[in-house]
Image (cartoon, helix red, strand yellow):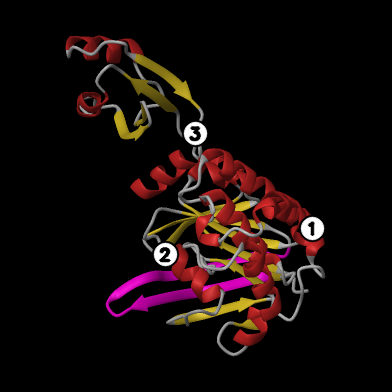
Amino acid sequence: MAEFAIEVKDLKKTYEKVEAVKGVSFSVPKGELFGLIGPDGAGKTSIFRILTTLIFPTEGQVKVLESDVIKDYRKIRNNIGYMPQRFSLYQDLSVEENLAFFARIFGTTIEENYDLIKDIYIQIEPFKDRLAGKLSGGMKQKLALCCALIHSPDILILDEPTTGVDAVSRKEFWEMLIRLKEKGITILVSTPYMDEANLCDRVALIQNGEIMSIDTPEKIIGDFGRKLWAVKSNNIYQLIKDLKIFDFIDTVFPFGEYLHITATDKNVDISEMKSVLKEKNHTDIEIKEIEANIEDCFMELMSN
């Protein structure tokens, strides 16, 4: 097998007047779990559709297992498993019928590669006679993953596989991916959920068709390089406005019930902040220094 499972160089994709991907370059070594992390519209799906030979690149070179996505698309399709963003199995076929159908397309059988899908399939096997369209969101994702794996691909490409799935199913799904990686399968996964980045070996943070950073989650967080504080009060919306009166505050971003702030100075006068905020009728004020996470890094890169 190639040293790199995937090589992308200066990739561009344009739809009429819209440039969805703007000169992206990255490579994925075999056996790696690589994440493409970014919001909707960042260009993730376009990149994945090019990698799976569903659309052609406008410019650039893309190789999958050393094969060109344009010249060798037939060869590539036999060696990848793909889960698109939307559930794309046959909703009027049963669980078992869907799986048998996809096995037959690739010239194999459920029995031949059952060991590869066993850990996943046993969770949906009690519902094997149920129509795919009648499954829950988590069960649909498990079935789709089984169908993507049934021909024993070298590479698994998953486009936002946990979007719209409950928290428990998200956790189970990622546990399944980690077990598949341990079997030597190269996995590319895209997600808008920043917390899922920590489960990848390496990630590319992407926004508006451009990659802002590629590294391990630990390295990206380690490079944040600034002190960070979490602030909250009884009125989070007014707090956003009132924090901007302080000259030493650089960025203010909402994170759940807190605001995360960075400062132009290394030290923040917390007592002064609390005093001014109390004068502006804020109560239940809390200010604490915290460690950055991937989402903080993403927001920082966007603001540069």
Q: On the image, numbered disc 2 is attached to which residue?
A: 43
Q: Residue at x 45, y 29 (%)?
A: 227
Callout 1, which amino acid?
Lys
Residue 292's disc number:
3
| Mark 1 burial class by Cα count in 10 Å: few <14, some 14-19, many 20+ | few
Q: Name the residue located 48 percent from the left edge and 74 percent from the top edge.
A: 11
On the image, the x and y values in percent for residue 272 come to 28, 12
Outermost left residue: 280
Q: Do the residues labelled 2 and 3 touch (CB within 8 Å)?
A: no
The spot of residue 232 in percent (x, y) is 33, 20
Q: Give the range drawn in magenta.
A: 5-30
Principal secondary structure, stretch drawn in magenta: strand
Could you tell me which residue is drawn at 58 percent across and 82 percent down? 69
Q: Which of 121 and 274 is in front in this view?
A: 121
Question: Residue tagged by mark 1?
Answer: 183
The Cα–Cα distance between marks 2 and 1, rounded to whole angstroms, is 29 Å
Given the image, on which type of amino acid does mark 2 rest?
Gly
Whether the magenta-drawn stretch holds residue 269 is answered as: no
Question: What residue appears at the point 58 percent right and 52 percent down from the top-left corner?
Answer: 139
Q: Residue furthest front?
A: 129
